[in-house]
Image: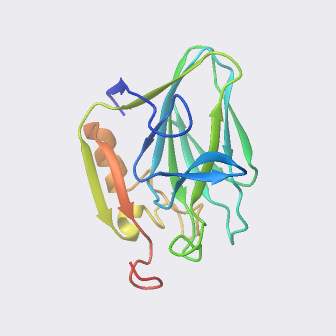
Amino acid sequence: MNQIIPTSANGCIPNVYFMGRWTTQTVESKPAMYTTNLGAQILFEVQNADYFTLEAVIKPLSAPQTLSIYIDDELHLTPLTQSKNDFKLSSNQSHIVRIYFTGNTDQDEIWLGNDGLTIKDITIASGTLAAIKPAGPLVAFIGDSVTAGCWVRSKAPSIGYGADLNYAAQLSRALDWEDYRIAYSAAGIIRYG
């Protein structure tokens, strides 16, 4: 991501930007953000903070969901095995954070169930958090497992997926596009789509 611009938060979590297909869901009587789409992203800038905390809903799945978290372009590949995850920042300067929903499995009930990614909160103990987005236009990528980034890293379900590495992600980052992904693995094969 070369050019970013400040923007307004667009979900129920303050000071962050949700890019792609997200919806609000109620979890434990509180609003949370939910997506079924690999390649959906969360973007924000953190200033003067030692770390940020991401709180997700952990679901009983065959393999943990995977996030690709880029802090100043440094990758932290994160299987979601616990609900609260702290990400240390290298200094109290400004940091650009981009989080991709990178991995799930073909067995996750995203069509008729509730096995998509649910983010409850993103917080910092001190400093500031601000929503950002790419400076370019919104571009939609509609497709199947190739567009979703399945099996890019390896043949392991979820952790082997690479929604942050496939053609849609790389093209969008190179051209500063807002990447709006509508893509499902095994669409039309295992599940109707």
Relative to 53, 167 lies left or right: left
Q: Is residue 72 visible?
A: no
Residue at 64% across, 49% down: 78
Question: Percent from the top left, x then y, of residue 56?
Answer: 67, 48
Location of residue 176 with respect to 79 vertically, above or below: above
Pick the quarter of the image with the N terminus: top left
For this rendering, which residue is in front, 32 or 141? 32
Asked where in the image residue 142 lies, by quadrant, the reply is bottom left
Question: Percent from the top left, x then y, of residue 38?
Answer: 47, 59
Coloring basis for residues: rainbow
Pick the quarter of the image with the C terminus: bottom left
Location of residue 169 with respect to 158 vertically, above or below: above
Asked where in the image residue 2 lies, by quadrant, the reply is top left
Location of residue 128 with respect to 75 vertically, above or below: above
Location of residue 19 with respect to 157 vertically, above or below: above
Residue at 29% across, 58% down: 141
Residue at 46% across, 66% down: 150
Q: Is residue 91 visible?
A: yes
Relative to 76, 10 lies left or right: left
